[in-house]
Amino acid sequence: MRLGTLSLYVFSAAMNGATPAVAGAATPQAPAEATWTVDAAQSQATLRVPYLLLAKTTATIPVESGTVVTGAESTMPVRVDLHFASAALTTGDPKRDADLRSDRFFDVARYPAIVFFSDEIIATNTSTFSIKGTLTMHGASHAIMLDGHSSTEDRSAGGKRHIRYEATGSFRRTDFGMTFYRGVVGNDVTIDVTIEATSP
């Protein structure tokens, strides 16, 4: 019995362990993703650190640029990349700002940017998640964990989608080479990140 051309191809592919393509069969597509652009004017990081064990100094650092990647039909992030402008750090006190921007602390002349990118994001509920990421600051990179949540999505008059994310975590400043004023300025720094992002 002769085998037709298609039958021969299927028989040959099966003998070689391959899965033959079937004419007309749909090719599986990778899940679509959406990339949201971070609104720098509405996004920032707030740092809080104990001072003289009595009070906390608070500094804000604006977001310079960033993206949030989600599923096409979801606002749950799957990847986050953020660039902060350390040279624009402010506490509301010009003298203290100059000190923090100096080589005693952030050394913004040498390290004008702080970078964060996510390594893994795990959803903990419909609108909450944990982010394991890498923070690069003052010439050093270290892992950091953030607990985050998203707020209600809305739309602008132009039809663009907007979403707000908030996340909090902590790090030790000495891990990033900031050792000045030990015993006066605390070592454990709380970081709160607020992001507003817009769909394409």
Image (cartoon, rainbow, N blue to C red):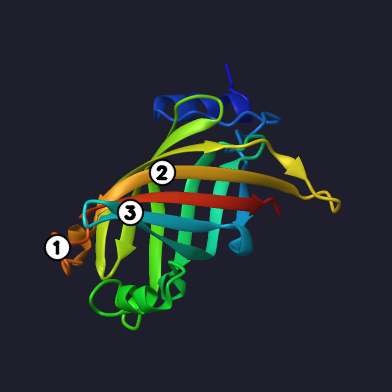
Q: Is residue 45 above or below residue 153?
A: below
Q: Nearer the viewer, residue 13 or 145?
A: 145
Q: Amino acid at mark 2?
A: Thr
Q: Position of residue 139 (x, y in %)?
A: 26, 70
Q: CA distance from mark 2 to mark 1?
A: 24 Å
N-term mark: 1 or 3: 3
Instruction: Name the residue at 60% across, 33% down.
Output: 28
Figure check: 11 above or below 155: above
Determine whether, in the image, residue 133 is placed left or right of residue 22.
left
The residue identified by callout 3 is: 56
Q: Is residue 111 visible?
A: no
At a point 59% along the width and 24% down the height, the residue shown is 7
* Residue at which label 2 appears: 168
Q: Residues within 10 Å of mark 2 (few under 14, many from 20)?
A: some
Dot placed on the residue nearer the N-terminal end, 2 or 1 = 2
Position of residue 47 measured from the top left corner of the image (x, y, whole percent): 38, 56
